[in-house]
Each structure stands twice: as structure tokens, then as C-alpha cells.
Image (spheres, rainbow, N blue to C red):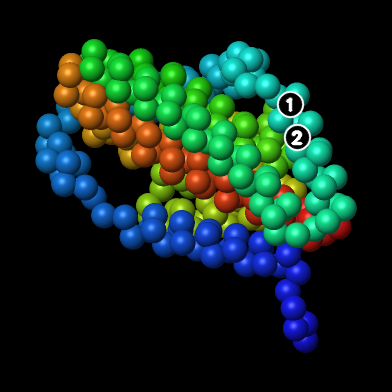
Amino acid sequence: MKLFKSALEKEWMKLEKDENAFLNKSLHKEETKLNQFLEDKVPDGLQKTLDEAFAKSFGLVFEKGTDVIEKTYKKDDIEKEYQINSYIVNLKENRRNLKAFSKKASGAGNKNLLLSGVSGVGLGVLGVGIPDIVIFTSLMLRSVYETSLHYGFQYDTEEEKKFILLVIQGAVCHDTNLLKINSELNAFMKNGCFSKNQNMQDCIRDTAKALSKELLYMKFLQGIPVVGAVGGAYNIAYMKQINKYAEIKYRRRFLMKKREI
């Protein structure tokens, strides 16, 4: 029996604590009073409209927008920074050096929080809800892309895109499907493949439905001039949730790789 845990083991324990806390909080989330108030005011067909808008946005960004998104941050610098941090960890594996990766990932996520809030509130004041989805989707993916790079992972293959879509689904899910998604993500990290052979379009549609279900009331509110600023401000809350879950899952992948070395 080991008397002292290594820095890597301590970070792994911290990761599992953070992941369990995230899952428990999401599974026990209660419907807000604002959502209850808006429930009978949302027009029929809005969720279907949101489904289609999110699906088109993901398809557009994956097909043509990734190169544009990459121009908004310094990909080469992030990759070099990861290599430097990895070299330092290999020289001295302590908790401070291991935490450097999550610190950088969290910093990038905070910048994207601010951008999502500014765009959401600004368009909400004008009563623009649906068109904001393209911007929100781009910022979601930009944030996850940066997180993946800070932990040494790419995002351009079909499998990595599916991984990202499942992360986003899990981040906004509050029922038992969250546990299934979380298990699927962990299985992918362990085995290098998904347990079910779902094509990209189905994965996009599932993610679009998860987002439209969660953001339905806020996007409805955002479409009302002036008052819509409140709905737009909720972009920050949802982006924060996505950033947190993405950071946890990529941190797990990173630590799993370190444990295998």
C-alpha cells in the first residue's frame, strides 16, 4: 500500500471530484421560475425552428467555418505552449505544473464567455433571437476548440467532431441521458472509438435538439426587443456550463494519457 500519492494521482482524484460535482448539479437542476412563467407563451413550432437553426449552424461551421474560427485565436501559439508545458511536466511532474494546462484552458474559456454575453445582450436589445444562433454556435465551438488544444488534442477529424458534439449535449442535459453521454465519452477515451456507430448528421441533430430544448425559453425571450437582453444574457450561463464540462472531459483525456506513460 502506497503511503503517499503522486501528483498525478492527486490530480486524478481532483478530476473525479469535479466531474461528480458537475454531474450531480446538472441532474438535480430545477426549472427556473422564469421558464415556468414563459412555458405557455412560447409559440408552437419554435422548438422545431431552433432545432433546424442549430443543425444548420453546426453543419455550416464544420464544413466552412472552422478555418474562419481559427483566425480568431493563435492556434500555433497554443500548440507551442502545450508542448512547452508538457516538457516541463516531463522534467518535474508536480501538481503546479499539471495544473498549468487547466489554467490556460479556463482562461480561454472566460474570454469566450465575455464574447457570448456581449453578442447575446446586444442582439437581444434589438429583439434578435434566432440569428444569434450562428454566432452562439461559433463561439461554443471556438471555446471547445481552444480547450482541446490546451490539452494537446485536435478537433478536425470526424471522431473528434462527434466527441465535441457529445460534450455539448452532456453540458446542457439534465436527465439520465447525461449519465449515458458521460459514459460514452469516457469509453471513447479508453477505447478510441464510440460504442454505437452514429453518423455525423444524426449526431448533429441530437445536439441541436438538446440545445433547442434547453435554450427554448431564452431564445423566445431574446426575440422580444429590449426585454430580449435578459434572454441574451443567458448565453453566458450556458456557455459557462459548456466550458466547464469541456474542460473536465479534456482534462480527463489528458490525465489518462499521462497515466498510460
Instruction: Kindly identify the amino acid type of the residue bearing the numbered disc 2.
Output: Glu
Residue 49 visible in image: no
Q: Which label belongs to residue 211?
A: none
Residue in the picture at 44% in, 24% down: 115
**Would you say 183 lies left or right of 92 here?**
left
Q: Which residue is mark 2?
A: 81
Quadrant hosting residue 2: bottom right
Q: Secondary structure at mark 2?
A: helix
User: Is residue 91 visible in this depiction of the protein?
Assistant: yes
Rounded to the nearest angstrom, the CA distance separating label 1 from label 2 is: 6 Å
Q: Is residue 129 above or below residue 230?
A: above
Q: Residue at x 19, y 41 (%)?
A: 35
Residue to which mark 1 is pinned: 77
Quadrant for the C terminus in the image: bottom right
Image position of 240 with respect to 111: above or below: below
Q: Quadrant of residue 49?
A: top left
Q: Are marks 1 and 2 in contact (CB under 8 Å)?
A: yes
Q: Amino acid at mark 1?
A: Asp
